Image (tube, helix red, strand yellow):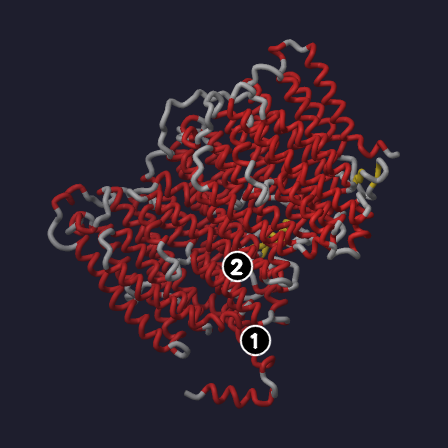
Amino acid sequence: MNIAASTLEIAVIVLGVVIMLADLWIPRDKKNWLGYASIAGLALILLGSLNMSGTPSELAFGNMYVLDSFAIFFKRFFLIAAILVIAASVEFSQKFQTGKGEYYCLMLFALSGMMFAASANHFALLFVSLELITITFYILTSFLRNQMVSLEAGVKYLILGALSSAFLVYGIALVYGTTGAMHFDALKTATASMTDNKLLLVGLLMVIAGLGFKVAAFPFQIWAPDVYQGSPSSTTAFLAVGSKAAGFALLMRLLFMAVPDIALQWEKLLMVIAGITILYGNLCALPQRNLKRLLGYSSIANAGYLMMGIAAMSQSGSSAILYYLYGYMFTVIAAFMIIILVMKHTGAEEITHLAKLHERAPGLAGVMTLAMVSLAGIPPMAGFFGKFLLFKAVLEQAAVFSSYYALLGVAIIGVVISLYYYFGVIRTLYWGKQQMVPEEIHVSPLSRVTLWVCSIFMIYLGILPERLMQAAVSAAESLKF
Amino acid sequence: MSILTFILVLPLIGAGIVALLPKSAKGGIRAVALATTGLSMICAILAFLTFNGAAEGDGGYKFYQKVAWVTALDINYQVGADGINIGLILMGAIVSFAAVCVSASIQERIKEFHFLMLIMIGGILGAFMSIDIFFFYFFHELALVPTFLMIGVWGRGEDKNYATYKMTLYLTLGALVALAGLVLLYVQSGAKTFDLITLTSQLRDNPLHPGTQTAVFGFLLFGFGILVSLWPFHTWAPLGYGAAPTATAMLHAGVLKKFGIYGLIRIALPLAPQGAQAWLEVLAWLCMGNILYCGWVAMRQKNLNLLIGNSSVAHMGFVFLGIASMNLIGLSGAVLVMVAHGFLAALSFGLSGYLYDQKKTLEIDQYGGALKQMPFIGTLLVMAMMAGCGLPGFANFAGEVTVLFGAWTSLPWFVVGTAWGALIIGALYALRAVRNILHGPLADSASNLKDPANYWVKLPYALLIASLLLFGIFPSLLTNKIQHSMTQVVESIEKGLDEDKVMLADEPSNDEGDITWAGQP
């Protein structure tokens, strides 16, 4: 047994337990220190992850757990996301009456689930890590327990999450029943000869449906806007970035490493899912007035763009997904940080609350503009380069199979639609009509640093993509196309 | 370091300095903007003067510089100038400086305006000097967000929200369609590079399959066409320019709009010549839409900015006609028109912006007899209108007549339509505007109009009209430079088309007979 391979996860869990214990002794007005300690601990773990390369790949726990460059890439992603989200939580946690310490340690446990998911090489680990993420999120989404919207969000997430878990388990059972294998390497050899076994296909479809819930892809996207709107903003940020990325990591591993022969038959299905998800997300975002709900629909649309990379079924498609996720992470966390700072005391996060933010806080308005421009995919922001890579991956496939042109057309239409609502937010920032007395805005040093980090990386990844691009390409190589 | 890099980077450095200056340092902000764009203009003039057209290595580009950017995809920062873009770079730098000069009239949020304007200028200049198709696109898109914000915040008129959204959505749609074409070119060429020089030589030796070429050219034609306001995708342009602040309209109508045409000449024609031939007839008909339909629309305008906007859309028809001719004379004429129209559009929008600042309206019937009160501005407006309807002596005449000569051999009936559209329709709306605004009895409310007292205020207009006259009287300054580079482009096209014949003909021995037959009327 090779426990050393999972050092990072173990360190995160130990950190979570330490925070949980420390919570017992820390006085109520000093709970922010738990957040600072979590950030410091995670930063150390991130530093430790830098000297891991994942090549050659290591296996552990009876080959259920694999540590390759793909896994390392995602583990770093989750660690960075968690650091930024916890920094945002410190700002947001002023709204919590109790349980600040629990909030941080739940975040850490969710993080460990995501990191295990990045290494899942077996259906059992896939299921357990997903449940670890989902169950912690049931609590995190309803953490504002004296507010109806938050409870409603929690219940919705609970019911639909349970449903998706049921799909997942049933699917796994069918796959196991037909092939007799749970291990991804064994599945690869077993499924190669049974690509037209109906029961196996139904089972795999159910597994994909379960993962589709996590990434909020059509037709399993229905929970996203409500949960995004109702949850505490810092939870929403983690849900949008971490949970979605974990879903994509598993989807890529499952489709391209466990059942590559079947995946190749499903390019049309994946294209249709990608196209409808893009259109659904963008069209529904158009009439939204609530900023968090708008970002919820935008996250559906982004799941659609990412699905394009899956549908491309190629090395360049996968590395494009990896690149896109990093840009998306910095962008979305910056946007939620602004929401947390500007709308601290209002219950509803209406877009109109941002009106004339430019005059009250030009810096915050600038960061929000960068975030919206990046989400819209315009140079020189990170979002542009990610979309560029995805488009390129799709066009490469269009040379072989011309239906990909249709997918590209849908994506272009989606981007043009999305420009309308993203630029609507920018318009509100600079020349919107102010409708109420604006709140006073106070930005703590930690939030300031977080915003700086997010803005710098949004621009850095758009202007100097070289290093991350190389990392993404070498991570995608371990998917073995 | 290439001089082109200086031309490009100076405004961006200026933007960086402006961002760091405090809001209250209005004089400092203006000084930084003027100094950086002025220096950039001087560099551009130097580059233009030292450009001697002699082709060296690197695909015939002078002032060449290459810095690796993303090695995994072979994307490089690559700038260079040849006869086709040297004139455009010069025009862009002069118009940029003029646009900064006229922005003295901006009263609120000066810092933000100048920051956005300098970013936009950097993007514009970068787009015209890039010879890497990724950066070509990247720099163009850099100007999009500043355009949106400048029209939205500093724009004028009731429907500026509508105008700014319409413009942004159209431009993004066009840019994305063009991007699809560019990436398709990258994917299909098999060269695994975004480097235009390598792509050109690769595709010259191994042309794409005709069907693929048709797809690529289709993407590029409609993508770039939307950006250049090709009829019927032109409706964003007059509205957007009508609502835009003066500097934005000057930069966009003058320089940025030429980006699409430049892309067609630089990338689409030489790399997909057979695709171009397949789309030729469509393009010729659409350009008639520009010249005739938009000319008619311009005739009915009651607002000076909408008139100039529509006439600028109509003028784009000439350029498309030059492209449709696909021969040396027509394409050289197209480049001449691009440069000339850049100066002209910037001058017209600059003058209309001056009038607007004086009177807060551009409705033509509110004016009358203005020439009496403002001889300087009035004279320039007369000259601009005359240049717009193709009076000899201005650069526009040189370009337009060259296009007509070039297109005559292949598209005679379109030339007739164009000449009619330009001479009759153009003269009608231009002369009518001159009569209503400048001549006739003094309008009641016209008493507060006056010429700029300060020479500095006159400078940008003088600079633009001087450039128009210079290239009008000595068009050879440009044509000598264009000719050499354009010959290479035309050779690429002809080779690509010959390839077609060789591929399709069963017996190559018939070729000679075919050609003599085709040469007869």
Who's the residue at 50% across and 57% down the image? B177
**What is the spatial separation of the Cα atoms under label 2 and label 1, in whole angstroms?**
23 Å
Amino acid type at image mark 1:
Lys
Which of B192/A181 is in front?
A181
Q: How busy is the neighbourhood of tag 2: few (under 14 within 10 Å), some, or many (20 plus)?
A: many
Question: Is disc 1 surrounded by few (<14), some (14 to 19) or many (20+) residues within 10 Å?
Answer: some
The residue singled out by tag 1 in the image is: B495
SS at badge 2 = strand
Return the x and y of residue A139 as percentages of the image width and height: 63, 25
Quadrant where the image shows the N terminus of chain A: top right
Q: Is residue A380 above or below residue B87?
A: above
Kind of residue sitting beneath label 2: Ala
Q: Position of residue A318 (x, y in %)?
A: 67, 49
Mark 1: secondary structure: helix
Check the image and name the residue furthest to the right: A1
Does residue B242 lie above or below A30 as drawn?
Answer: below
Mark 2 lies on residue: B81
